[in-house]
Amino acid sequence: MRRSLAAACLIFSLVSVQSVVADPSFKELAARTEVRPIETLTLTDQQFLTGDKSGKAAVIAGELRLPQGASGRLPAVVLMHGSGGAGPREEFWSKTFNEMGIASFLVDSFSGRGLTSVSANQAMLGRFNMILDAYRAHANLSAHARIDRSRIALMGFSRGGQTALYASLKRFHQAWDPEVAFAAYIPLYASCNPTLIGDTDVSGVPIRMFHGSADDYVPVAPCRAYVERLRAAGNDVRLTEFADAHHAYDNPLGGKTPVVATNRRACVPASSRRRRPASSSTPKPGSPSATGIPASRSIPTPATTRRRHWRPRWRSRSCCGRSSN
């Protein structure tokens, strides 16, 4: 009886697999996946900012996913995770880009250093260390036979978003890799708090920033100010804000209730926090006006491409921000 039941379950599973294969979303599966070692350094912020290359040698990894049906050299997006490490959000974007015919290269800056998360203690890894990891990832991809070196973009989330933002500084290019040349920088809900020497002298390629107006873990206000300074210096930069979106709004498995950081301090009661009213002209995620890209090539967001996975982050009732992602 048990064997008959097991056989029936197996047959049912095979039938289910066949139905999945016929689903259009099957295109999100990579034609080829490679886990590539990346030689880098573990540095303090002081070492990175001063160009001190005496840091500890480290080997991290990046997962390269090549899309189906593509030939020749491909465009690629390097993905930098947040403080919680790589997870469903990064997998979502990897598959989304693959569906667009774009290769993805997800860099894991933690595992090779013996880390899983720095959410509770950001000092476990220098804030700027991942910029070097991004540069080394660019060099790794540039040597790949299937990747078009001139079409490699950098995208990051939260801590990784800060990486994607400040990796654009020419000062850092000159100090760490004069050959690095990303085609675009795409920071999502990045912290713009640091004010650095030469921080308006950035690469001449597009910088496209995305942030939730309701983000109270990494507030958008400093980014508004930084964008104004970048624009005043003649840079191609744009900040898109999504009304009522909180931190890590694109995490497909993110719950509606924010997770409060364990090392929270200086809490401000929700009743005393000032909310910025959403503008009626605020663009919707994925719209041409939000991305600055023609509608046929707009960067998709979970709200526009995967509504079955979309779980918005509603306003928090707790007095402090949530753990960084």
Image (spheres, rainbow, N blue to C red):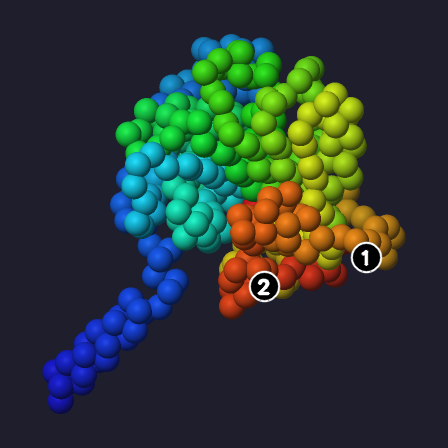
Q: Position of residue 311 (x, y in %)?
A: 59, 63
Pick whichever, 98 or 113, lies toward us: 98
- SS of the residue under disc 1: loop
In the rendered structure, find residue 155 and report the number of the disc placed on it: none
For the point 51% across and 62% down, which residue is it? 306
Residue farthest along the bottom direction in this orientation: 1
Q: Which image quadrant is residue 44 in? A: top right
Disc tally is 2
- The vertical placement of 316 against 185, above or below, is below
In the rendered structure, find residue 311 and report the number of the disc placed on it: 2
For the point 70% across and 21% down, which residue is it? 200
Residue wearing tag 1: 280
- SS of the residue under disc 2: loop
For the point 68% across and 56% down, which residue is it? 284
Pick whichever, 280 or 254, lies toward us: 280
Q: Which image quadrant is residue 71 in? A: top left
Q: Position of residue 275 (x, y in %)?
A: 83, 52
Task: Give how far apart the Cα atoms at labels 2 and 1 are.
Answer: 22 Å
